Image (tube, helix red, strand yellow):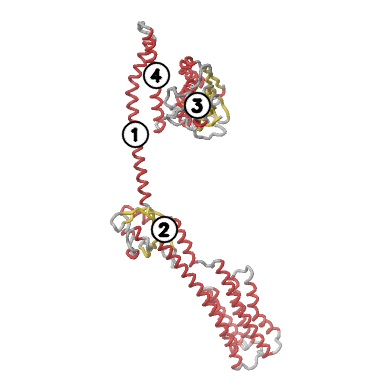
Amino acid sequence: MPAGETLRGLRLMGTFKKATRPPESGQKALRRLFVAVQASKAAVGAVLAVAFIGFVGRPDAAEAIAIAGLMAPAALALLAYTSVPLPLLEQAALAVFAALIGYLAALTGGVVSPLVVWFALVPAEAALAGGRPAVLRAAVAACVALFAVAAIEAAGALPVSHLPVPVWELYAVSVFAAVVQAALVAAAAQDRQRAADQAAAEGAAMYRFLADHAMDLITRHTSDGRIRFASPAARVLLGHAPEDLLGLAPAALVHPDDLRAMQSAFVEASYFARPASAEVRLKHAAGNHVWAEIRCRPVPRADGEAADIVAVTRDITERKAYERELIEARDLSEQANRSKSRFLANMSHELRTPLNAIIGFSEVMTHEMFGPLGGPRYLEYSRLVHESGSHLLELINGILDMSKIEAGKFELSEEVFDLNAVAEAAVRFVKLPAERSGVALKTMISPTAATIFADKRAIKQILVNLLSNGVKYTPRGGEVRIRASLDTHGIELSVADSGVGISAKDLERLGRPFEQVEGEHVRSKEGTGLGLALVKALAAMHGGEAILESTLGEGTVVRVRLPYAAVDEKGERLLPEEAKILPFRGAAA
């Protein structure tokens, strides 16, 4: 059971004893009890009214009011079947009862009336309506009514009693009725106490069941952290019997390095009345330490002192071991990445130096700058050496750029520049292989997109990579076209070819480093699979996106959207109406 759920269960059960309103079934039972008591009082009142009429005869107006008061509990019993709150009905019943006894006593002789004994029943009945405050209020009401009767009698303002001379028979009847009423109240009080005891026993059993069977350790602490109660889970978590933990302070259980964290959680819960948690190492009976998560909440005390603390502790050793493995794996990965970066940096220096010499000398030989080579094959071989060296240098630069981007070391150098000039430079770079393959290169740049704000080298690399792919996979007689335009989303660069196209299943893979299309049309093509990955990464660094659309046998279009590259006639940047950075995605046409 999670620590949070266990703590929530304790909180719900903790409210059982403190609830001021019973559950719905308890409410119905209390209303039935109230109806029974009021009905019995009405029945006793009816008996008294009949006896009074039998002794005195026809009642006058004042006596009629008294008889109506005797029957008032019947009206309260009927009101209990409505939506009137039960506490309000109980308070009204007590007030009516005290006033009725005082009124009847005033009509039947004052302080010597046989009904004075009924004042003792007012606080007794109040015990059914609530706790000590209700009883005290009822006692005060009864005393006030009694003193009012005595004051009226002392002032000589009592009405003439219609009772005969108070003889023992009248007192006997009154006391008998009071005893019957007291017996009914006592029986009702016993029923209520029995229900309360049963509910308390069920609550205690529920507490014990949860504490005994919860996998998490449940403890109760004083405000300074000392343990007052520990559940049986202490044997599993710490190897100690629950009674061995009683009275122990946090310092006796927690690792010294984690003591401050536990004390802070306890202070937060006890003195600031806020739930708190901490991850600490607890001492096991075997001598080792167990990683545990402690969640604690305050339990307010009635005396206003600092609150006790209920804590739920669960073993998180496995989770901590997993976290440690992740950290170690991350450190190893970072170390490997640093090693890779150092290796690539060294290889860059070691490879570029001889490659530059190879490319430079082969170019001199190709142009026969110092005289003829002596044979046509030498000229062809020098050209091949130059092309191979250039290709190898291009691959190395691509790998290095991709490595820098992944390591976050690639920095943009944005400026305002002429896109036409960059596009022409990119076309010149692939012009020779395009002519050899019989592929036409075309450029269509809108005047509104001729000037942009971006990293010139990155934009050139995007165009070169896309043009190279287009030329590589377009058959003789086809064409590769560069377009650039301005719309509400910013600048859009697109490179479209009329080549072999890409199947739908390959679209999702493209754009990841070293991923290439597989198939009989492209199997013999050279490349590392970094071209589209670089395009994707460079577009994202500009806050844009790259969208790949293709249909097998019909060609491919790659759209690069640069939302922050547009500039106006003054060379100032234009913000797009909708600038949203999206991941690289493939979309089948």
583 versus 393 height, above or below: below
Instruction: Point out the tag, 2 or 1, that comes first from the N-terminus.
Output: 2
Q: Nearer the viewer, mark 4 or mark 1?
A: 4
Q: Residues within 10 Å of mark 1 (few under 14, many from 20)?
A: few
Q: Which residue is mark 3?
A: 453
Q: Amino acid at mark 2?
A: Cys
Rendering quarter of residue 286: bottom left
Instruction: Point out the tag, 1 or 3, that comes first from the N-terminus.
Output: 1
Q: Nearer the viewer, mark 1 or mark 3?
A: 1
Q: Residue furthest front?
A: 520
Q: Report, in whole angstroms, how far the alpha carbon at label 4 lies from the one at label 1.
A: 28 Å
Horizontal and vertical percent position of residue 494 = 53, 25
Rendering quarter of residue 348: top left
Q: Report, in whole angstroms, how far the alpha carbon at label 3 lies from the one at label 4.
A: 30 Å
Cβ–Cβ under 8 Å for marks 3 and 4:
no
Q: Which residue is mark 2?
A: 296
Which disc number belongs to residue 207? none
Horizontal and vertical percent position of residue 84 = 62, 69
210 versus 450 height, above or below: below
Q: Nearer the viewer, mark 3 or mark 4?
A: 4
Q: Report, in whole angstroms, how far the alpha carbon at label 1 lies from the one at label 3.
A: 33 Å
Q: Nearer the viewer, mark 4 or mark 2?
A: 4
Q: Amino acid at mark 4?
A: Ser
Horizontal and vertical percent position of residue 433 = 46, 17
Q: Quadrant of the N terminus?
A: bottom left
Residue plotted at (71% across, 85% down): 60
Q: Which residue is mark 4?
A: 390
Cβ–Cβ under 8 Å for marks 4 and 1:
no
Q: Report, in whole angstroms, how far the alpha carbon at label 4 lies from the one at label 2.
A: 68 Å
